[in-house]
Amino acid sequence: MHVSFEITDEILIASLDGELDHHTAAQIREEIDKKIDNFHCKHLIFNFKKVSFMDSSGIGVVMGRYNKMKELGGRVMVSGCSSYIDRILNMSGIYTIAPKYNNVNEALKVVKNKVNEKVNTEGVQ
Amino acid sequence: MHVSFEITDEILIASLDGELDHHTAAQIREEIDKKIDNFHCKHLIFNFKKVSFMDSSGIGVVMGRYNKMKELGGRVMVSGCSSYIDRILNMSGIYTIAPKYNNVNEALKVVKNKVNEKVNTEGVQ
Amino acid sequence: MLQSKVDDKSFDNKMKLKFLNKSQNEGFARISVAAFVATLDPTLEELTEIRTAVSEAVSNCIIHAYKEDEKGIIQVECWTDEDRNVIISVTDEGVGIENIEKAKEPLFTSKSDEERSGMGFTVMESFMDRLEVESVKGEGTRVTMIKKLDIVYEL
Amino acid sequence: MLQSKVDDKSFDNKMKLKFLNKSQNEGFARISVAAFVATLDPTLEELTEIRTAVSEAVSNCIIHAYKEDEKGIIQVECWTDEDRNVIISVTDEGVGIENIEKAKEPLFTSKSDEERSGMGFTVMESFMDRLEVESVKGEGTRVTMIKKLDIVYEL
Ligand SMILES: Nc1ncnc2c1ncn2[C@@H]1O[C@H](COP(=O)(O)OP(=O)(O)O)[C@@H](O)[C@H]1O
Ligand SMILES: Nc1ncnc2c1ncn2[C@@H]1O[C@H](COP(=O)(O)OP(=O)(O)O)[C@@H](O)[C@H]1O
């Protein structure tokens, strides 16, 4: 399992590649958390497009990042899920806290809108 | 394992695809022999280009076909070997009876030349 | 080790796998089972479901049964028959499960601090046709999963 | 069954595989071993060599040891250590080999009618670093193969 990162406007995009199980989850978790801390990211978008295998460890990874981002006042979003990965994530009800988008760009658009909304609201007050 | 066939001027081209071991060799052998008999082929060119795995059962398949074609007065040629398949075939010395060519076309050119030579010689006598 | 209740004789093909309780063996275990089941020509979807269910059962041995102690031994057995039934049994000699009904509930986990979701048994149940869990406290656990593969029509 | 002389304790990881003597299991056996060895990050060439050697040893059990009797059991064991040594043992309880030296000669086969080339042992010897054959007539055969993987330099 390999993760590559992209950062834009405090938003971290983590693209996973390979097999995500209990063994690889530990390493993935650590790499993502380090990036969040080092670059002071506020929001996280998972890109599952290149994940060839995933078991329920994947749910734990998303859940754990949700808890972390909530503390930082940010959001977690999920994108690029195959129907198979979707089945596993959906089972757990995780989408109610980390919503799903078709691809990274859709997720990015939504989170940027929310950020702007917040800025506007704060500006009005 | 899957074999596809092409026939041109009594020459049978057998293109193997997949994993060639003791289990799949039995089926491959039968399919090739049936084609040789049904279409009265005289020469046989093996194309190993799409063989993803091969053990010494592959040597047996080539050797067996050599014995069959010899009885019919024909030749067996081998083509499209990766360096790994080449290593195994070469170990057995099979190339002294079933020579190796880079690809099907090279083998085809050689066998057609020999056929023509023979026709010419026979014509002269 | 808990004894299997499956009768070998009524099955067509059988394999048994034992390996050390190391998390790097998770991938190896599910690939092995998938390669064994592949001889029945399953669909890609069926194979993925089986791989995932095996991964859940094996990681439960590593995380829960042996608490990451790498000396433990995990046993995976697999039977197939002519009617395309696949039976998979994953057995450990670890701590055992006190309350099996509770353990099987969605979202129940005894290790939420380690980011376990409590969805392992739910995934196994939803990807396989049947799931049976036997466990003796202090002796170990055996998870048996059954799936009937779809019939393949020859062209 | 012939007892293994490898001491489990001096190894880092270990697996054992048992399966019925069916030729459709040849692919499964070599995939399993390759998946186990893959945890050491071998080169693609090393992995292919190991897969091929395992395929030779397993098909010898099926063809020669059990003469295609599908009730026989084949056992494959694999050990790896931190120095990247891989040991693979393939054991049967079949007819045994009368003359091991002769059996190992290139081109020697007792089954030329079945298109065996007699190159199985030669392939195992050339693809692995070491090959040991133990056999007791009427009791079975154990083939042990050792290969040291190249060192991988981290980037
Ligand atoms: N092999 C096992 N040995 C001991 N306890 C187990 C075993 N498998 C599961 N359990 C228990 O059942 C609970 C639920 O398991 P599961 O649904 O797979 O979720 P998770 O692995 O995410 O905790 C575990 O948290 C654990 O307490
Ligand atoms: N596991 C075994 N049990 C009994 N005899 C064996 C076994 N393995 C090999 N042999 C004997 O050794 C001979 C040479 O084996 P090998 O080099 O693999 O060539 P091949 O399989 O093509 O015959 C076989 O023909 C057989 O007589």
Image: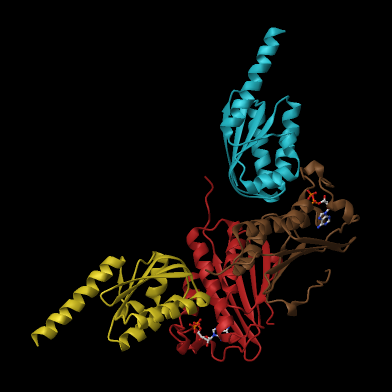
Chain colours: A yellow, B cyan, C red, D brown
**Residue at image x 67%, y 71%?**
C17
Using the image, determine if residue A11 lies above or below residue C9: below
Q: Quadrant of residue B13?
A: top right
Judge by depth and name the residue closer to the eye, B110 or D154.
D154
Horizontal arrangement in the rendering, residue A103 relative to residue B44 (left or right): left
Indicate whether A100 appears above or below D121. Answer: below
Q: Total number of numbered labels?
A: 0
User: How far across and down, in percent of the image, does residue D4 sit?
Assistant: 80, 71
Whether A116 is drawn above or below B56: the answer is below
Considering the image in quadrants, where does the N terminus of chain C appear? bottom right
Tell me the residue at 72%/43% (across/down). Answer: B90
Residue D140, image x and y in percent? Answer: 85, 62
Dividing the picture into quadrants, the one containing residue D113 is top right
Residue A46: x %, y % from top left: 36, 72
Please, is residue B100 above or below residue B21 in the view?
above
Q: Position of residue C149 (x, y in %)?
A: 54, 61
Report whether residue D25 is seen. Answer: no
**Residue D75 located left or right of residue A11:** right
Q: Is residue C50 visible?
A: yes
Residue that extends furthest to the left in the rendered view of this protein = A124
In this orientation, which residue lies closer to the viewer: A58 or D73?
A58
- D124 left or right of B85? right
